[in-house]
Image: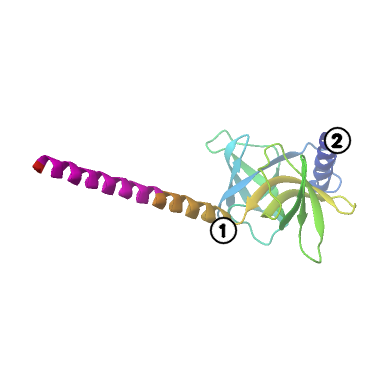
Amino acid sequence: MKKIVCVLMILATLLAVLPAGAQESEVFLLSGTIMEVLDDCVMLDVPELGDVQAFISEETTIEGVDALRIGQTAVVLYDGKMTRSLPPQITAQRISVYAVEGTVTEVAEDRVTIQRGDELGEVVLTLPENAPELEIGQSVIAYTTGIMTMSLPPIMNAIAFEFEAGEPAEEAEDIERIEDVEDAEDVELIEDTEDAGDVVSGQDNG
């Protein structure tokens, strides 16, 4: 069932990103995390290819966001031409960034439910194979293909997740506290050793 839903959503995405009258042309898409944003290009970290430089021209359209930023996951439509340079280069015809932000309310094996807000309501996201472990109550930003079903709740296909910046910081604080405890234990051991040494020295003097 998961594979069927994913295939249908991918096909819908391909049809949606094509210009009118060009459905018969071959489509070239890649998705990756934006690592750098310049005036005329963006650098993407693409799972299958590594770094890819996507040039932005006057004909390039940006969809889903007002501005591109580092950390976003983008889907890039291009003409299929890619240089053999390092990094490889393409010219983007369209850059799409569709994000769903909210709180996880339900977690299943192949999907997760996100509460987007009082007015927007819930959305169900099908998970990619490399999806991270998600927990109920977790605040996330899910990047999708931009295609949403008409069902209630609507269903979208997630391609990547971004977490709040504060969450890793809390983990780092926990590590620091553990290190402090270990340091304290080391001091106690040293003090115990010094006390033992004083006792031994006292016995020798006697």
Q: Amino acid at mark 1?
A: Gly
Task: Tell which residue pokes out farthest to the bottom in this image.
Answer: 119
- Is any part of residue 59 visible from this angle? no
Circle 1: element type = helix
Q: What residue appears at the point 39 percent right and 47 percent down from the top-left corner?
A: 182
At horizontal 66% and vertical 48% (from top left) the residue drawn is: 161
Residue furthest out toward the front: 206
Residue flagged by tag 2: what amino acid is it?
Met
In the rendered view, would you say 72 is above or below 129? Answer: below
- Residue corresponding to mark 2: 1
Spatial distance from mark 2 to mark 1, Cα to Cα?
36 Å
Does the rendering let one see residue 65? yes
Q: Position of residue 70 (x, y in %)?
A: 58, 54
* Residue depicted at x 40% and y 52%: 180
Residue sitting farthest toward the left = 205
Q: Which mark is residue 39?
A: none
Overall secondary structure of the magenta stretch? Answer: helix
Task: Pick the residue in front: 124 or 189.
Answer: 189
In reply to whether residue 190 is colored magenta, the answer given is yes
Q: Quadrant of the image for the C terminus?
A: top left
Residue at screen point 59% across, 45% down: 44
Q: Quadrant of residue 159?
A: top right
Magenta segment, which residues?
Answer: 182-204
Q: Which mark is residue 166?
A: 1
Q: Is residue 19 magenta?
A: no
